[in-house]
Each structure stands twice: as C-alpha cells, then as structure tokens.
Amino acid sequence: MTPSRLYLSPPDIGAAEVEYVLEAFQSNWVAPVGPNLDAFEEDFARLVGSKYAVGLSSGTAALHLALRIAGVGPGDEVLCPSLTFVASASPIIYLGATPVFIDSEELGWNMDPVLACAVIEQKVRAGKPPKALVLAHLYGQSADIAPIKMCCDKYGVKLVEDAAEALGATYGDRSPGSFGIAGIHSFNGNKIITTSGGGMLVTDDPEITRQARFLSAQARDPAPHYEHSVIGYNYRLSNICASIGLGQLTRLSGKVSRRRTNFRAYAEAFKSLPGVTMQPEAPWGQSTRWLTCLTIDPARSGGVTRERVRLALEKENIEARPLWKPMHQQPVFKGAEMHGGKIAERLFDQGLCLPSGSAMSEEDRSRVIRVVLAEFGA
C-alpha cells in the first residue's frame, strides 16, 4: 500500500480560522472588503512593527504595487537577488524595467550586501543609478538589511523588501519587511500563515498606503459614478480570505516554533552524514525555518547527490524540492545582467528542501529521516 503523500509545507488550519470565516458569512460580509479585512490589516501591521498594512490578492501583487509607487518604469534598472522565487523579479518586468541580478552570501543565502553596494556605486559612477532594489528574505532567514539600506539611502535607491518567506523572522529586534519604503508578505497556501491566497503590503508612509489602496481597487476616483484617471488593478484581498488570516495570526508563534523544531530534529539526525550541511542561521537574526533546507556536496558525500535523495523521497511519496533555481539561469531571463553567481549556482546544484509543515507529526518527520539516512547507508 502506497503511504500517504507527505507535502513540503501544507496549510495548517485551526478552529479560530473557521470561527472568523463563519462570522463573516453570518454577517454577510462576503464582499471584497469588510471588517475582518480591516482587523487583519491592523493586527498584521502591529505584529510586524509597521504603521500601515494593505491586504492584497497576492505577494506578487503587493510587490508590483510597491515598485509602481516607487516610480519604477521603462528604462529603469532594479537590483534583485538571483537566488529567489520568480515572483521577486517578475513585477520588475511588468513595469517595463530591467532586473539586475546579484549573487548570494554564505551566512544566510540572501543577497550579498558587499556585491550589491559595489554594483550600486558602479552604476552611480556611470550616471545611471538603479531605481530600486528588491531585497528578498529566503526560507525564513532575514537578509543582512543594514548595509544594503545604508547604501540605498546614500544613493537614493528605493528599497523594497520581499519578506514573503520570512513572516515571524527577526533582524536584530525588528521584523524583516519593516526597513524599506515597503515590505511584502505572502499568504500563499505553503507559507507560514495562509489565507488560501493573498498578500500584504506594509509601510510607514501614509502616501504609499493611500496609493496602494487606490491602485488596488481599480484606481477609482472620488465620484458618484465610476471615474478613472489612471489604470489600476483588481488586487484587494477579500474579507473571507482575511478572516482566515485573522485566525492564522493568533497561532503564528506556535507555527514558527514547530518549524524550528522540525529543523533541529533534521539537523540532529543528519549531523554525521558526510557532505551534508544544514542552512546556517545568520548572526543578525532568527530564522523561522519556513523550510528546512540543506546542501549535499557530492565530492564529500561518497557520490550521494541532492537529486538522488530527492528521487528516493519521491519514491516513498514524500515531496522534496531543490532550492530556487537562480534567476540568471532561468530561460525567461536569458541574457540578463548578473553580478557573481557561483554561490547561487552551487546552492541550487546541491540544495534540497525537506517537508517542514507546522502540523507535521514526529512520525512523518521520522519517515523523511529514514529515507535520507538510507541513501547514505546510515
């Protein structure tokens, strides 16, 4: 009998979410906006330490709006990490701008601050400073924000943080996503909290908030009829989805704790395996361990590769995935400007994400561990 499918990061839904959704139905607030959306935005802004939050249909929509409000348009260049999900880069293209990809650093696998600042300074000297920089925080680990923000502020580059994978993480004593002109969060089904689909733009700037609300609701001008002076989008989060989010927020700390427990259990089980290195936790902040990630160096592992382990897990009906394929290696970005690349390429070649859900049982975790150990003959 085939064992049940074990997913990488499935939704973890509890009773509170059901109560909030039922309340929305009973009060007939099934329209796109409503009191639960207002409450979700307020609670979320308070949680991450930002003054304002705007609930949107996805993290991608939030990033698109943030870049548009930052003035990004045709002819502009926007710096972006190469090692990230495609949604960090796609909105740059939506706006007719050009992505410039930057390699990763070793301590947390995020954008290399030294390299990013060198590229900014190079472009400033050439008379064409980047318009913006998208700083992603990968796999629950904050990037090293301070040196990148300092460089952006010095040269007038708009910093937008893609914290889609890092809700609940810290940078010092603050939340990643609260340092740039805007921060982006995702509530996709595989994230630490989910609204089934959705996202959030957070900011301390009331004008960015005003524009985000305006543009996300089809840019309707104040009038008794439907008047439009600029093109907007249908990007607002629904009151029903926000109801799920309200319940999810009440359990965020527990979700983070359980994912960190998963990581520790995997790390302990694999500590003696040759060539296996767990994703480091950078010294500047605590990771949520959204996904447990590791690398397998075949030169030290006796020939065991990431792909061999992934296929062994798949054979047992266990989902595991490689790390993000770098953007500069993606066909859609062929020929894009890239600075560095060896670290991102190595991480992709050797990196693997293991099942990490916050509702994962010890039995399921042991099932994963047994398969991995067996590939190493342990």
Image (cartoon, rainbow, N blue to C red):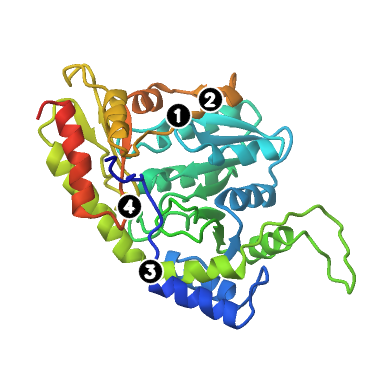
Please state the total of marks drawn on the protein image: 4
Q: Residue 121: x and y, percent?
A: 53, 31
Displayed quadrant of residue 72: top right
Callout 2: helix, strand or loop?
loop
Q: Residue furthest bottom?
A: 27
Comparing 341 with 264, the one in front is 264
Displayed quadrant of residue 281: top left
In space, the residues marked 4 and 3 are separated at their CA atoms by 14 Å
Q: Residues within 10 Å of mark 4 (few under 14, many from 20)?
A: many
Callout 3: helix, strand or loop?
loop
Comparing 189 with 201, the one in front is 189
The residue to which callout 2 is attached is 330
In space, the residues marked 2 and 4 are separated at their CA atoms by 28 Å
Residue contact between numbered discs 2 and 4, judged by CB atoms under 8 Å: no
Tell me if 53 is positioned left or right of 256 in this view: right
Q: Earlier in the sequence, mark 2 or mark 3?
A: 3
The residue to which callout 4 is attached is 357
Q: Residues within 10 Å of mark 2 (few under 14, many from 20)?
A: few
Q: Residue 1: x and y, percent?
A: 26, 40
Q: Earlier in the sequence, mark 3 or mark 1?
A: 3
Displayed quadrant of residue 168: bottom left
Question: Mark 4 against mark 1, which lies toward the viewer?
Answer: 4
Is residue 373 visible to us here? Answer: yes
The residue to which callout 3 is attached is 14
Residue contact between numbered discs 2 and 1, judged by CB atoms under 8 Å: yes
Callout 1: helix, strand or loop?
loop
